Amino acid sequence: MSAVRRPAAPAAGDHILDLDDLGVVFTTETGTVQAVRGVSLHVAPGETLALVGESGSGKSTVALAAMGLLAGNARATGRAVVDGTDVVGADEERLSRLRGSTVSMVFQEPATALDPLTRVGKQIAEVIRNHHRDVSAADAAARAVELLRRVGIPEPEQRARSYPFQLSGGQRQRVVIAMAIANDPALLIADEPTTALDVTVQAEILDLLRRLAAETGTGVLLVTHNMGVVADFADRVAVMYQGAVVETGPVEDVLLRPSHDYTKRLLSAVPRLSVAEPGEGRADERDATPPEASGAPAVELTDVSVVFGRGKHAVHALKGVSFAVHPAETLGLVGESGSGKSTASRVALGLITPTAGSVTLFGADLARTRARARRALRAGIGVVLQDPVASLDPRMTVGECVAEPLRVHRRRLSGREREALVAEVLDRVRLPREVARRAPRELSGGQRQRVSLARALVLEPRLLVADEPTSALDVSVQEAVLEVIRELQGELGFACLFVSHDLAVVQQFARRVVVMRAGRAEEQGLTSATLRHPETDYTRRLLAAVPVPDPVVQRGRRAERLATLAAGRTEERA
Amino acid sequence: MSTYSFLIRRVLQALAVVLLVTVVVFCLLHALPGGPARGILGPQATASQIAAFNHEQGLDRPLPVQYLYFLNQLVHGDLGMSYTLNEPVSQLITERLPKTLLLTVLSAVIGLLFAVPLGVWQAVRRNKPVDYVITTLSFVAYSTPVYFLGLILVLVFSQVLPWFPAQAPQGNDVADILAQPQGLVLPVVAGAATMVAVFSRYMRSATLENLTEDYVRTARAGGSRPRAILTRHVFRNSLTPVVAMLGYYVPVLFGGALVVEQLFNYPGMGLLFWTAAQSSDYPVLLGCVLVISVATVTGTLLADILQRVIDPRVKAGRS
């Protein structure tokens, strides 16, 4: 593949993508849904347009419509012109010639985007040969290796022979990107390309996409919900709300001086990582001692290690982790995937017995308590999990879901007393009492997560363990759910162990923080100090990788991060 | 796990299962009313005759000792004598088993050759007339007893249209039978019909599921044509669950052979089993049970190995 760009077809004008009054209607069993209406946008060569919005805003539907990849029950109207070809109404053969050559796509979920039974090199080669029939299989394979090298995969010759399951999430996404750029497309559509990845991997993937787009002058349509990613990557932004574009403009204007009310609301709900001003000293540490006056910690892990499996397959999930959560305080547990934060929260819940070390729950050593006593202790813990869909039994009503802990731990209550308690706790999480009779599926994601919270709180726990409670929610909903937890903590005084990968959320929500890395507690302390003036390189790298939703600040952070990386590399070489 | 150690482990597991089966078979033998002696000497035998027989055959010794003796005989290929045919059971089985294998393997292969493409075709034409017609035919074929289906086949293709003989080829070995292939057509079709019905359903649902997978979208986004996506990606991914089912289908195939062989008077294991059941020829019955058990264990073993070949994730222990 030559790096020379073919000139854009004259028919397309200056734009590589031109959406004109694009509409998409889905036909479902319950009627038709207008998912997208009247969307007119364009992408110029070499430019990145970010399409932002919350779930259900239609942003992914627009991206799929531009690829001609809409589901069978969807019908597009208007025009979606890619390099002179109107995708709307084009036949499959025409689209096949366009896809992977003129326009290509990077998807959200690298875990499922690749065929599990085909070696990655072969999958890349397939895209090349789809458009260059004259290229021999051997040449295509060699080019696939080159592409893997270009997207930064080490030992590309070996990796080309790997199956997708043998690669990490970030590497899989690099393979998907290699497929997308295999034929030097003029337009790259990226649908939440980094949402499933850790922040440090996200930063690398964004760097990669930016470099590739700059090298070849490719236009990029970036679909994302993450304002930090927008600030990091986009030249222009289009904000979508309920199927329509409500605001378009240069990234500085939209993110710093939004004009539409919805954009303003959306941006104000985004948790912002507060970063240290240059020269600012480390915050006062006197407050770092936990509030001993309020009594013993609700839960305390002392030098806890957890090993899964044995022999050479043993996985050391936790290595000597110690932390404590005190009544009425929130401890944030942050780290990337595989760092052991969820394992640590499960140890605190008594669901995993540590291989070494001790766990004290409300002053009682879990290893020395009998099953019955441990059960009683567990009644003092409430749990909220990440997925509001999967964590509620679809066959139960909301009322039954919330009442379940009462049935287990307060068996002597009458049905009427139970109902009264359920109604009370629904009030507390600001849900109307009527939802008790409804099924979980009838509620929105945010409402469901409040139902989970109500269930966690119905026994008036002394400890709330929240494992990524808002990661599946839109920012505006996340803000509301976090607010409810904060208020109830003020009223009820429970201790809260808050597990999250989102440093900005933890910074706003937790008083103290533990940064986890590869099964160890890398660093811990007051959030205000630790996340503003980290003491370890790892935390510093983690923080530097978080994109902030301010394009000007983010540009500076990115330059700084890349300079640090380059310096590190030079040092290594020396 | 390396392929080598996997094979060893898996074969050892299979052997353990077969050993368990021998225990069950041994217990069945002794659970017969009056024990094997009554079975052999007949209902008129006196108590002293039975006692003498039991002593002679070692049947008055403790059960575990007897089991070891039984096992020893088994290892030496001695499954006892048939009560009615006056031949060693092992000889009957070595004579009949190849013929049954011929019938079942032919039925299975031909059945799959139709079932797999039909299932894929249905998935691609989902909810179109073709899909409905094949679905209906599948359910009819699935719910028709093999016996009834065989009778209809004989009536139509042997009586009304004299195309094929109503009786299966006779003969002492596989070569004799293969010399008269026209006689095999109806038994094989009868045996394959259920196979086609069941496996076209499996293949249809596996293909449908895979067609909605993300990797299909990725391939389309790379410009792959629908047909290429189907043959290069979806087909192989859909085959894995179907292969797993195949292993568990072995006993069903033998069950089908039982009926088909009786119906077409085909001289295989099924017919042997059938006549033995009618004449209470216990040693033969138990020999057949043992053979079918071994076949089932072998079937699942082969399916496991095949799955490992198709799906690299199985080898890595991540499926």
Image: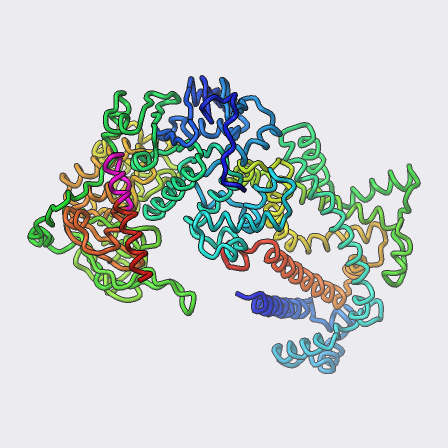
> Is residue A375 visible in the rendered structure shown here?
no
Tell me which secondary structure the magenta stretch mostly adopts: helix
Image spot of residue A454 (x, y percent): 26, 38
Image spot of residue A27 (x, y percent): 51, 22
Q: Is residue B48 above or below residue A429?
A: below
Q: Nearer the viewer, residue A81 or B265?
A: A81
Q: Split into 4 quadrants, where in the image is the C terminus of chain A?
A: bottom left
Q: Split into 4 quadrants, where in the image is the N terminus of chain A?
A: top right
Q: Is residue B7 above or below residue B182?
A: below
Q: How many marks do you count on the picture? A: 0
Give the side of residue A537 with respect to residue A19, left or right: left
Give the residues drawn in magenta, as a range: A545-559
Q: Residue at x 57, y 54 (%)?
A: B311
> Is residue B96 visible in the rendered structure shown here?
yes
Q: Residue at x 52, y 30 (%)?
A: A69
Q: Is residue A13 magenta?
A: no
Instruction: Give the image quarter of residue A254.
Output: top left
